[in-house]
Image: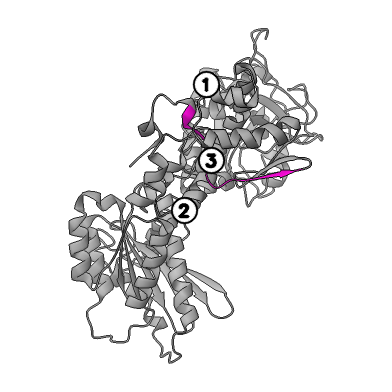
């Protein structure tokens, strides 16, 4: 697989080219560059008179001195013109021969990856789209089942730039093809096209046979099916992750009523297109909603249904030899099964889309802004802080529960995302609220939230909420509590990365945070009592949205040497 680093370590001026796939249009207002991540309008006399000539000279591979002489520019002026063009990815380094090797016969695919290089592993200014093209050419796709669908999808895949696309006549042929590609099994995807309702129920189940072959080869198997009035895509069978084919077939039994309507040419084309879309999503690492689901598209109204494909209660294979004993255990096991994250190699994502990686990274610091809420730096966060106070102690505890070990440097850039307490995926699902007596923090109200990104205390509401309101339903004594700390889980943020597994991970994060709270409070000589429950109205008191954030723990804090009267 060719990556930008394989191309050259010493870029030359003559390697600079206008990125493929861009449209450059001169107008009376300037020069419009269209086709990249954003449209650019380059204004001024230099844009309208110099840049069109510059682009022609760069594509012609002219030396820097020749370009300067032709355009009448000094070395500094030329560098000033090139710098923003490189930063925006309008110009890229493309050594001779690399583009030709990767783009031969792939004009549309090459154009797409060139325009979106940053999304598929490249950087502005390099020839990163070669990584995307190399990923396509490295993928190995085996199509089996209905010949009409297999050949239609194969033609589309080849036109899209997939380098190795084979159509297997039967399962034995598919096994031979996988055997020939054994060393590249991790880059293989087998796709099986079938009728949604088998015509010959007594014939061997080709899907089951293919599943066993794929399991042995370590390759995932995507099922696509054509119904009389609908098309189906999914699931992707992956050994140890997806329910087995036998369990899937049991779930189909309610769908086997007679359907006599003939397949239409439109339905065949739609299913082939959906299959190709899912294959390309797997290859490029795009987000896929298929995985362990069957997605059904009804024709002609285009309504969509989605079904989880779960293990049967009595399947020893899916349950590792120990099926659940009763209905209650089965329901619990299925719930756990639904929350399992996929293995890292599933599906076969060869290219990891940069946009998706950036989205997941952004979750680590994604917080509600509360722009109108008063806030203050966490007491004790600066060296000027005097002797410890209640505010300093509470701030220190909240920081150690949900904060960072290192703060931003003077430039404002955070030097580390390392946290005091463990957090699944570093998504920081635990957010800490404090309910105190009036006057603890130099802020209005008595309900506060810790902002871990800014290391600040934020006033949640202006009114003074008594401790008794926060302790309602907890069973904790008001006269033995000087402050209440509430741990919450940002389930919506977790779900952005972990989907249904977010709920389980939220509980794990909450357990780590609660343990950290006990340890830190003990270090400060404080007494902590955790509540066994709380009033449902606590969410309203904290002004959190229950569908995005939930309370996971409530702790009463007794501050040594302070007045314990409850206000």
Marks 1 & 3, CB-CB < 8 Å contact: no
Please tell me in which quadrant of the rendered image residue 484 appears: top right
Residue where numbered disc 2 is placed: 107
71 within the magenta span = no
- Please name whichever residue, 344 or 372, is drawn nearer the observer in this view of the structure: 344
Residue drawn at (38%, 29%) of the image:
8
In the displayed structure, does residue 561 sit left or right of residue 567? left
The percent position of residue 9, horizontal first and vertical second, equals 39, 25
- Please name whichever residue, 527 or 167, is drawn nearer the observer in this view of the structure: 167
The percent position of residue 519, horizontal first and vertical second, equals 48, 24
The percent position of residue 330, horizontal first and vertical second, equals 37, 64
- Please name whichever residue, 427 or 111, is drawn nearer the observer in this view of the structure: 111
Marks 1 & 2, CB-CB < 8 Å contact: no
Residue where numbered disc 3 is placed: 19
What secondary structure is found at the residue carrying circle 1? loop
What secondary structure is found at the residue carrying circle 3? loop
Mark 1 or mark 2: whose residue is earlier in sequence: 2
Residue drawn at (54%, 28%) of the image:
401
In the displayed structure, does residue 539 sit left or right of residue 312? right
Residue stretch rendered in magenta on the structure: 14-27
- In space, the residues marked 1 and 3 are separated at their CA atoms by 42 Å
Which circle marks residue 405 in the picture? 1
User: From the viewer's perspective, is the residue at label 1 or at label 2 nearer?
Assistant: 2
């Amino acid at each position: 697989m060719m990556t930008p680093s394989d191309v050259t370590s010493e870029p030359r001026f003559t390697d600079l080219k206008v990125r493929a796939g861009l449209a450059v249009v001169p107008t009376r207002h300037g020069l419009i560059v269209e086709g990249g991540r954003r449209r650019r309008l380059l204004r001024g006399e230099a844009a309208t008179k110099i840049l069109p000539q510059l682009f022609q000279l760069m594509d012609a591979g002219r030396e820097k001195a020749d370009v300067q002489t032709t355009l009448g520019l000094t070395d500094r002026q030329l560098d000033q013109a090139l710098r923003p063009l490189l930063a925006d990815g309008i110009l890229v380094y493309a050594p001779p021969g690399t583009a030709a090797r990767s783009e031969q016969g792939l004009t549309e695919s090459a154009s797409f990856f060139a325009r979106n290089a940053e999304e598929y592993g490249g950087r502005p200014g390099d020839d990163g789209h070669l990584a995307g093209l190399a990923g396509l050419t490295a993928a190995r796709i085996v199509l089996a089942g209905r010949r009409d669908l297999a050949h239609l999808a194969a033609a589309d895949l080849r036109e899209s730039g997939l380098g190795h696309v084979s159509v297997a006549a039967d399962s034995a042929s598919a096994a031979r093809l996988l055997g020939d590609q054994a060393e590249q099994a991790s880059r293989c995807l087998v796709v099986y096209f079938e009728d949604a309702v088998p015509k010959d129920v007594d014939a061997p189940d080709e899907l089951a046979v293919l599943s066993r072959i794929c399991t042995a080869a370590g390759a995932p198997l995507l099922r696509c099916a054509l119904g009389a009035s609908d098309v189906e895509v999914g699931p992707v069978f992956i050994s140890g992750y997806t329910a087995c084919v036998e369990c899937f077939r049991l779930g189909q039994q309610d769908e086997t009523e007679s359907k006599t309507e003939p397949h239409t040419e439109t339905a065949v084309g739609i299913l082939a297109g959906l299959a190709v879309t899912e294959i390309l999503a797997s290859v490029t690492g795009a987000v896929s909603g298929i995985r362990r689901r069957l997605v059904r598209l009804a024709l002609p109204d285009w309504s969509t249904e989605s079904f989880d494909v779960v293990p049967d209660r009595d399947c020893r294979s899916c349950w590792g030899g120990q099926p659940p004993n009763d209905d209650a255990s089965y329901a619990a096991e299925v719930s756990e099964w639904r929350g399992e994250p996929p293995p890292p190699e599933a599906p076969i994502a060869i290219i990891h889309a940069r946009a998706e990686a950036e989205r997941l990274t952004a979750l680590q610091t994604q917080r509600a802004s509360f722009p109108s809420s008063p806030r203050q730096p966490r007491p004790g966060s600066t060296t000027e802080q005097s002797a410890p106070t209640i505010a300093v102690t509470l701030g220190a505890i909240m920081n150690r529960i949900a904060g960072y070990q290192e703060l931003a440097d003077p430039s404002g850039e955070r030097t580390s995302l390392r946290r005091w307490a463990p957090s699944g995926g570093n998504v920081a699902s635990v957010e800490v609220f404090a309910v105190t007596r009036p006057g603890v923090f130099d802020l209005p109200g008595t309900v506060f939230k810790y902002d871990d990104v800014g290391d600040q205390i934020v006033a949640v509401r202006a009114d003074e909420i008594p401790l008794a309101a926060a302790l309602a339903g907890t069973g904790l004594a008001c006269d033995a509590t000087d402050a209440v700390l509430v741990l919450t889980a940002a389930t919506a943020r977790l779900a952005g990365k972990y989907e249904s597994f977010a709920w389980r991970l939220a509980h794990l994060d909450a357990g780590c945070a609660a343990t950290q709270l006990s340890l830190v409070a003990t270090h400060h000589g404080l007494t902590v009592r955790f509540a066994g429950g709380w009033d449902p109205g606590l969410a309203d008191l904290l002004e959190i949205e229950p569908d995005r954030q939930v309370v996971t723990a409530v702790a009463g804090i007794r501050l040594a040497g302070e007045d314990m009267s409850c206000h």
